[in-house]
Image (cartoon, grey):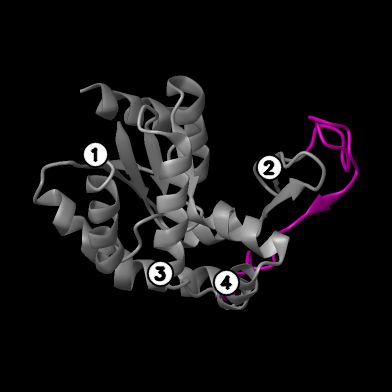
Amino acid sequence: MNIILLGPPGAGKGTQAQRLVEAHGMRQLSTGDMLRAAVKAGTPVGLQAKAVMDRGELVSDEIVSALIGDELDAMGAGVGAIFDGYPRTAAQAESLDAILSSRGRKLDHVIELGVDEDALVERIIGRYTCANCGKGYHDTFEQPREPGTCDKCGSHEFKRRPDDNEETVRTRMAEYRAKTAPILPIYDARGIVARVNGMAEMDHVTAAIERIIAA
């Protein structure tokens, strides 16, 4: 099974993708994670992508498509894919069709997580993670049980993404509205789009997604 999760940054795509991985043995293909790995490694592509990402803009289709194709080849045909935040544009949607077709795959579901923009800004700018194990926290919604100490690993070091600020978040939302939302009619025409309230409790969102893929 191959699934696209759509929604603006911070809508919960990553969280829901990870739950699908755990429940169904699928593979999450997050362009953000792949790009951050390239940035961390300091590769030429990573350095190029970093400048773009820091401005809250989108990297080129060529970079993203190459990353996706390589990941699909590495994981093998028997493993389902969850596309987290990709495709973002009509051009990428066309590229994904070609990438999947050439590997004997097809899209089964496109699930959009709908959000309230102002509430989403609050959700994003308040989030941070443990610098050691990566567990996520939030200034308002989920703080460590013991202040300053990670619940999972006991570390006292935390970090925030530099692009988790209101100006950058709203820029990315504007990009989503302008470029990503218009791809939905492509998939609507195929009858594979379902919409879920991304602002609901995480477990409720998960349950709604499970109902969709089981149908």
Amino acid type assigned to the residue bearing label 3 in the image: Glu
Q: CA distance from mark 4 to mark 1?
A: 30 Å
Q: Is residue 145 magenta?
A: yes
Counting other residues with Cα less than 10 Å from the Cα at mark 4, is it few (<14), some (14-19), or many (20 or more)? many
- Label 2: state its secondary structure: strand
Residue 82, percent from left and from top: 40, 40
- Label 1: state its secondary structure: loop
Counting other residues with Cα less than 10 Å from the Cα at mark 1, is it few (<14), some (14-19), or many (20 or more)? few
Q: Quadrant of the N terminus?
A: top left
Foreground mark, 4 or 1, reads 1
Q: Camera-side residue: 168 or 34? A: 34
The image quadrant of residue 38 is bottom right
Q: Residue at x 22, y 65 (%)?
A: 182
The extreme left residue here reads 189
Looking at the rendered structure, which numbered label has been put on residue 136? Answer: 2
First along the sequence among labels 4 and 2: 4
- Label 4: state its secondary structure: helix
Q: CA distance from mark 4 to mark 2?
A: 24 Å
- Give the side of residue 156 with respect to residue 203, left or right: right
First along the sequence among labels 3 and 2: 3
Q: Is residue 200 visible?
A: yes
Residue wearing tag 1: 104
Q: Residue at x 73, y 42 (%)?
A: 134
Residue wearing tag 3: 62
Amino acid type assigned to the residue bearing label 1 in the image: Gly
